[in-house]
Amino acid sequence: MGQYNDYVTLCIGFGCNNRCIHCMLDGIKDIQKPIGMDTFRKVVDAMPRQRGLILSGGEVTIMDNLTDYVSYAKKRGIERIRIQTNARALASPKICKEIVESGVNEFFVSVYGHDAHLHDAHTATPGSFEETIKGIKNIIECKATLITNTVITSKNTPYLTDITKLLLRWTDLIEFLSYFPMAKEDTKDLIPRYTKVAATLSACLDIAPKSIVRYFPECLLGNHRNRLDNSLPRTIINSSYWERYKENEFGLCDMKERCSSKTCTGFPRAYINKYGFEKDLKPIP
Ligand code: SF4
């Protein structure tokens, strides 16, 4: 069982103050509708208190009423309340403190580079790195749990170790997620060759023993196989998202018949269309 099986994700707002080149909602953001307070209350009312709640979108920290949602969940006794965020708004100590006081105790913060040049190249928003790092420091100051998320792209693959070393200053709860476009082609040329990522990723997993990897071929993780976590939270989002998600055709691998992995998501269609099937896979016996 992976850690996300224990969470419910509710998508409450789709605005954003970044313009990430790898955004999973690219092209469908405008047609997404937030679930709204009534549905939110119904879901939260039915949730066991021990189950974690993830508030996502979009960038939820730019919503005027984020703390209304969080306070409601806190009042209902939900023990773990997480937001997925770029943390830019949290550069303000006051905003960060208000959000923590309303009930958020886990922050899942996206960091794509070890410096402003690389991170801002992913967010397409100059100044975003500086604000995100300030936000991270404020989260730590508020004594909330910090988990980071780094999407692995062709741009940041050579710097994954530098990114990991930077993040380790504040947390060892580091997650790496393979980039995949919600399409059959990698039109932005952001999918890295996984066989090239594997060695760098392995070095990162060595120096950050609690870090995990998502959506990466299991056999390419070698002796770090146990760090693959492809579990998914129950997610409540517009159905158009799932329609687009299907375009990925996850699970492609020509070795599947010979492999006993139960969790590997193989390769997305866009990867196969770009690089073809990999030759050096070692199916799990
Ligand atoms: S052989 Fe294919 S299915 Fe098996 S672990 Fe490797 S990529 Fe995944």
Image (cartoon, rainbow, N blue to C red):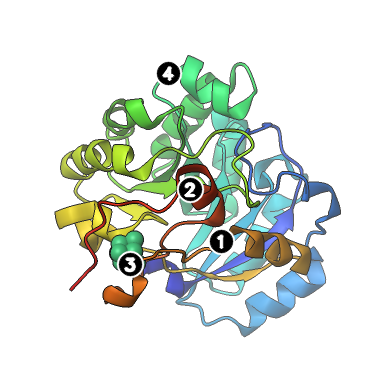
Where does the image place residue 43, in percent across and percent down from the top left?
Answer: 67, 77
Residue placed at 44% from the left, 47% from the top? 178
Pick the quarter of the image with the N terminus: bottom left
**Drawn side of residue 265 relative to residue 185, left or right:** left
The residue where tag 3 is placed is: 255
Q: Identify the secondary structure beneath mark 1.
A: strand
The residue where tag 4 is placed is: 115
Q: Nearer the viewer, mark 1 or mark 4?
A: 4
Q: Which circle marks residue 54 in the picture?
A: 1
Going from the N terminus, do you reach mark 4 or mark 2 first?
Answer: 2
The residue where tag 2 is placed is: 108
**Does any portion of residue 93 appear in the rendered image?**
no
Q: Nearer the viewer, mark 2 or mark 3?
A: 3
Cβ atoms at labels 1 and 2 below 8 Å apart = yes
**Does any portion of residue 52 appear in the rendered image?**
yes
Amino acid type for the residue under numbered disc 2: Phe
